[in-house]
Amino acid sequence: MNRRFIDQVAIVTGAAAGIGFEIARQLAREGAFVILNDVDAEQAVNAAARISSEYRGHCLPLPGDAGSLPVIQALVDHAIDHFGRVDMVVANAGLTLFADFFEFSPADFQRIMNLNLQGAFFLTQAAARQMKRQATGGRILLMSSNIGQRAYPYLTAYSMTKAAISTMARSLVLELSPHGININAIAPGATLTERTELEDPAYAEVWSERIPIGKVGMPADMAAPALFLLSGDARHITGQTVVVDGGWSGVSNNPEVVIHSQLKK
């Protein structure tokens, strides 16, 4: 087993389930101390306990809205209070809202911007300030989406936030690199999680037909490149967005086209 993160300290938001949980779990598996955040307090506590029990490590819950400025500062403070430092941040928490552009409300617009953009921006700022004080560098990983690079029906506001996340990773290279801080993003495609399966029991079957490699993504498929970008192996990579979607964004002009079946013809 790789132990790339022994005694390093990570903050992972939106991590009670799905991709965030798998990233937190694998960081702990490889030796990291993890501050696990989720808006659902009970799920955050249970997820942290599960990880700590599984790997006999330290995974501490800190529930709260990851778009809230006090919660963001509390996450950094919690890491300092318990472990004395912050080495890695994964700004995973995000909100997806499907809605007709013509009917999209100002309230929903603010909700998605507050979590997806404000949360990522100010968590990055708070963590980078601490990393700068430590003078030991650090790694920041943002969560974009392949939908930030392609048109998809009823997801304009969400798509805007995910495109902005990629721009943020690229832009911050200038300000963070002098302090030894690398910042990157991953852009997951269709991924089978507790949420997506609950929303559509046929999710895996439907998306397996649309993805060129013929199978839907799993949280572990997203965690693998995430951990690589957080590791020392990626020390010369910064400002990049890595798309992890089984080839969907490379060939799809119409998101409703069943690509896999077409390629078989």
Image: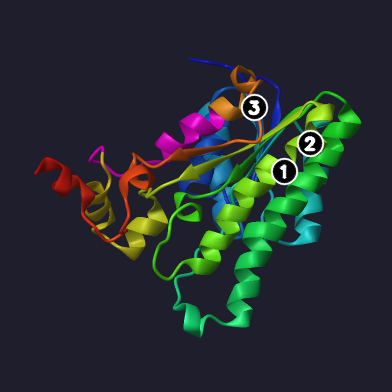
214 part of magenta stretch: yes
Residue indicated by mark 3: 32
Q: Please tell me which of labels 3 and 1 falls first in the chain.
A: 3
Kind of residue at badge 2: Leu
Residue 77 image point, x, y percent:
83, 44
Residue 13 image point, x, y percent:
63, 48
Main SS category, magenta section: helix
Q: CA distance from mark 1 to mark 2?
A: 7 Å
189 to the left or right of 9: left
Is 155 placed above or below 49 here?
A: below
Residue indicated by mark 1: 171
Q: Are marks 3 and 1 in contact (CB under 8 Å)?
A: no
Is 234 placed above or below 60 here?
A: above
Q: Return the residue nearer the eye: 260 or 118.
A: 260
Q: Return the residue nearer the eye: 155 or 77.
A: 155
What secondary structure is marked by label 1?
Answer: helix
Q: Which mark is residue 174?
A: 2
Q: Residues within 10 Å of mark 2 (few under 14, many from 20)?
A: few
Q: Please tell me which of labels 3 and 2 falls first in the chain.
A: 3
Q: Residues within 10 Å of mark 1 (few under 14, many from 20)?
A: some
Kind of residue at badge 1: Ser
Residue at image coords 54%, 50%: 16
Q: CA distance from mark 3 to mark 2?
A: 28 Å
Q: Which residues are magenta?
A: 213-227
Residue at image coords 26%, 37%: 213
> The C terminus lies in which quarter of the figure?
top left
Q: Are marks 1 and 2 in contact (CB under 8 Å)?
A: yes
